[in-house]
Amino acid sequence: MSITLHNGPAQTASSLAARSFVLGYGVLAYLTFFGTFLYAVGFTAQLVVPKTINSGATSSTGQALMIDLALMSLFAIQHSGMARQGFKKLFAAFASPALERSTYVLLASLSLILLFWQWRPITSIVWEIGTPMAYAAVAGSFAGWLIVLYSTFLISHFELFGLTQVVSHFAGRLTEPMKFRTPGLYRLIRHPIYLGFIIAFWSTPTMTFGHMLFATVTTAYIFVGIWLEERDLITLFGDQYRHYREKVAMLIPGLF
Ligand SMILES: C[S@@+](CC[C@H](N)C(=O)[O-])C[C@H]1O[C@@H](n2cnc3c(N)ncnc32)[C@H](O)[C@@H]1O
């Protein structure tokens, strides 16, 4: 639900220009996210895109390890830091809150683009699966990406990526804070988006050391992200989230 702001009949040209800027910025951020998402599929599955997790400039294993860990750390710091309520309050003191989610999405996408561009491959093989199981592994990875995308729609895709906020701002309405939702997969597990990522990153017919480093660090980061996110969700939704956490598994129904 949204609330209409009473701007009066004489909306000035400058306020229209400001609202158009916010809208354009949000659309640009969304398109950057969507392009980055599609590239991420190709990057990890090594399909279609020019630079993948197993290609690009080669360096010594030690150097590659340091560069890749630095790139993943940069993403983690940006992604987790800006997602916290404290940062959101700080942002609102300096800029329109309508821009907050889009800025978060834009900077997360840019740090991922940097990672894709500068990622150093480490191509020693950890496992290699022959056909027909190789096809199953590729299908598993695509299933993971589909779970991610589908789940974003379950909890409000366009709000998650900032478009709802900038469209509401353009229309002169205040958007209400994001609601707590538990449709579909969210009735089975609390974090289907993160589960989708884990499946997408680990399900591969050829696991190189570099790919395994990426999958291991991102999986560990997801567990830290869950801990931080659930702390915020309890602050925001209190007992509603506590009861949900008691009843619904984190990632695997019936296990944990
Ligand atoms: C990248 S999404 C990941 C959501 C969830 N952890 C998952 O893996 O499906 C992170 C955002 O979703 C929000 N969120 C998490 N669970 C939610 C729910 N059940 N309903 C609405 N928003 C949720 C968090 O507050 C956060 O802003």
Image (cartoon, rainbow, N blue to C red):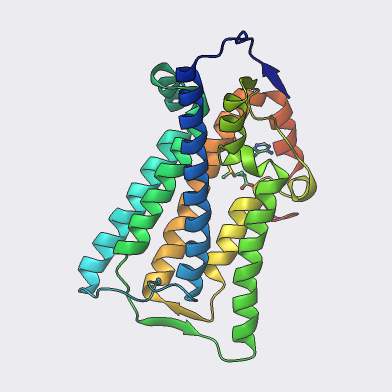
The answer to which of 165 and 177 lies nearer the viewer is 165
Question: Regarding ligand 1, which quadrant of the image does it lie in?
Answer: top right
Does 67 sit above or below residue 100? Answer: below
Residue visible at 40% across and 71% down? 53
Left or right: 253 with respect to 138? right
The answer to which of 176 and 62 lies nearer the viewer is 176
Left or right: 39 with respect to 142? left
Q: Is residue 84 visible to the viewer in this orientation of the structure?
A: no
* Residue 23 percent location from the top left of the image: 52, 33
Q: Is residue 184 visible to the viewer in this orientation of the structure?
A: yes
Residue visible at 69% across and 41% down? 155
* Residue 186 percent location from the top left of the image: 74, 46
* Residue 237 percent location from the top left of the image: 67, 25
Does 183 sit above or below residue 166? Answer: below
Which of the 4 image quadrants contains residue 56? bottom left
Left or right: 82 with respect to 256? left
